[in-house]
Each structure stands twice: as structure tokens, then as C-alpha cells.
Image: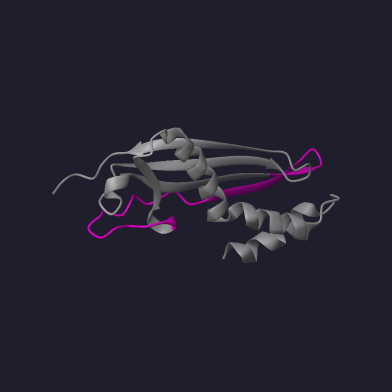
Amino acid sequence: QILKVLRPLCQELCKGLRENSEKIYMESIVRLANSSNSADSYFSLNALLGSQDLVLKPLGETGIVLKGQNAPPEMPPTDLTLYQANGHLHAVLTESTTYGLFRRSDVKGKPWISLTARVHERVNLTTGASVRQVQTQILAPPPEL
């Protein structure tokens, strides 16, 4: 659905600018890819673990949900804002990924801790300058039944 709207939006935003709307369209699609954002958050979080005994794995839509496990809470939708300012084209993208932190000896069990990584990126599509931040939130464990 978004692809049908994104191309005409890029064309409209590029009117009066020296930007190539197709280039902006393709760059937006790359930035919207789950693999791009989840890879950044994965490597940022994995670097913080500091233990060979812990394994970080994506859960839910972007990863796995193991048998007998509750699905992670529904994530907020990906949010993309494109706008023009001072002759430049800008984008703001926010996307979430849920991870499970497993003990290496129990990778097939329930995650020890579930957490959500939210990637927030601001990019000037005219100059190519960008900033990405990853925020992490530890999710409360599901109640035992």
C-alpha cells in the first residue's frame, strides 16, 4: 500500500527542487526496510551484552515466536514523515523491533528478558546527512497462568 502512495508523494515533494524523485523514492524504500533498522538495533544491543552466555534474537513479525510462548505485544506502526524545508528534502523515520534475550543453554525456551528497540532516524535527503538513535525498553514478563 505504501509504495502506491510513496512514489507520487516523492514526485510532488521534489517539484521545484533539484532532487530526482526516483532517487528519493528508492532511498526511502531502503530506509523503510525492516532489515535495515532491525540490523542497526540488533548490533547496538548485542554489543552491550558483554556475555558469551547470552543470545539476542528478534521476536514476533520480524523474528521467531517459539511454541508455548506468548507473542510479543503489538508494535507501533512504522512512522515515516517526508517534508521540505529551506530548499531541502527531509525524512523522519521511527520503527520498532522486539527482541528476546536468551541464555545460550536455553535458546529454544522462553526468553529470559523481552525488550523493544525503537530506531528513530532523521535524514536530510538533499545532503545525505543523517542521525540514528536506538531507544530500548524492557517489556514486563507475561503473567504466569
Which one is nearer the viewer's eye here, 55 or 93? 55
**Image quadrant in which the N terminus is located:** bottom right
- Residue 27: x percent and y percent? 69, 54
Coloring basis for residues: one colour
**Is residue 143 found left or right of 117 in the rendered image?**
left
The kind of secondary structure the magenta stretch mainly shows is: loop
Which one is nearer the viewer's eye here, 56 or 120? 56
Q: Residue furthest left?
A: 145
| Residue shown at the point (53%, 54%) measured from the top left | 34
- Residue 10: x percent and y percent? 72, 56
Verify whether residue 78 appears in magenta.
Answer: yes
**Is residue 79 found left or right of 72 in the rendered image?**
right
Q: Which residues are magenta?
A: 62-90
- Residue 25: x percent and y percent? 71, 58
**Is residue 49 found left or right of 68 in the rendered image?**
right
| Residue shown at the point (23%, 45%) measured from the top left | 142
Q: Quadrant of residue 120?
A: top right
Q: Is residue 95 above or below residue 68?
A: above
Which one is nearer the viewer's eye here, 91 or 33? 33
Q: Quadrant of residue 28?
A: bottom right
Q: Quadrant of residue 7?
A: bottom right
- Residue 3: x percent and y percent? 62, 64
**Is residue 88 found left or right of 91 in the rendered image?**
right
Verify whether residue 24 appears in magenta.
Answer: no
